[in-house]
Image: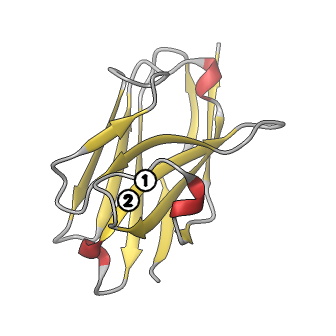
């Protein structure tokens, strides 16, 4: 397993941007599929985006397509989520996750075996 630490959350007005970053410790980082999830109060954790081990395959939830971009730097052991045109409904705690690479991208929370503690994103209207 790897250890994950998210950063970059905060308060932003609707239409604004934030960039989340996840620092990953562990020499096996490049063997993991990475993902970003979010959980709003009273709701289940949902996938936001996922990226393959080599960065060539990505997945986005329909609700964020065209607004969010996931990227990974295997040399720096980081995975970032650039969030543009933010909406109040994007408000949630955002989690970084790592999972084994048995598929190019993963979307089920149960497929990930390492999680960060989360970072709060609040979008005001």
Q: Nearer the viewer, residue 110 or 20?
A: 110
In the rendered image, the quadrant that contains the C terminus is top right
**What residue does disc 2 label?**
34
Q: Position of residue 47 (x, y in %)?
A: 53, 42
Q: Residue at left 47%, top 83%?
A: 1
Identify the residue at the far front of this view.
102
**What residue does disc 1 label?**
35
Which structural element holds mark 2? strand
On the rendered structure, is 49 left or right of 72? right
Disc 2 and disc 1: Cα gap in Å? 4 Å
Q: Residue at left 32%, top 67%?
A: 101
Q: Give the number of callouts.
A: 2
Q: Position of residue 78 (x, y in %)?
A: 31, 64
Query: Residue 21, labelled with which disc?
Result: none
Task: Please say if 121 is above or below 71.
Answer: above
Q: Nearer the viewer, residue 85 or 41?
A: 41
Res. 6 visible in picture: yes
Q: Nearer the viewer, residue 108 or 5?
A: 108
Task: Please say if 118 is above or below 37.
Answer: below
Residues at marks 2 and 1 touching, judged by CB atoms closer than 8 Å: yes
Res. 8 visible in picture: no
| Crowding at mark 1 (Cα within 10 Å: few <14, some 14-19, many 20+) | many
Q: Position of residue 26 (x, y in %)?
A: 36, 85
Instruction: Say which quarter of the image contains residue 32.
Output: bottom left
**How are the colours assigned in the image?**
secondary structure
Q: Residue at left 44%, top 80%?
A: 2
Instruction: Say which quarter of the image contains residue 9.
Output: top right
Which structural element holds mark 1? strand
| Crowding at mark 2 (Cα within 10 Å: few <14, some 14-19, many 20+) | many
Task: Please say if 1 is above or below 44.
Answer: below
Identify the residue at the far bottom of this view.
27
On the rendered structure, is 121 left or right of 112? right
């Amino acid at each position: 397993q790897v250890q994950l630490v998210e950063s970059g959350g905060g308060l932003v007005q609707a239409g604004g941007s934030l960039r989340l970053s996840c620092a990953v410790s562990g020499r096996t980082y490049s063997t993991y599929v990475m993902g970003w999830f979010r959980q709003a109060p009273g709701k289940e954790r949902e996938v936001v985006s996922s990226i393959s081990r080599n960065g060539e395959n990505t997945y986005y939830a329909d609700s964020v397509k065209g607004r969010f971009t996931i990227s990974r730097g295997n040399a720096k052991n980081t995975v970032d989520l650039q969030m543009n045109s933010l909406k109040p409904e994007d408000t949630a705690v955002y989690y970084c996750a790592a999972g084994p690479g048995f598929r190019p991208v993963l979307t089920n929370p149960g497929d990930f075996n390492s999680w960060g503690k989360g970072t709060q994103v609040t979008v005001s209207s």
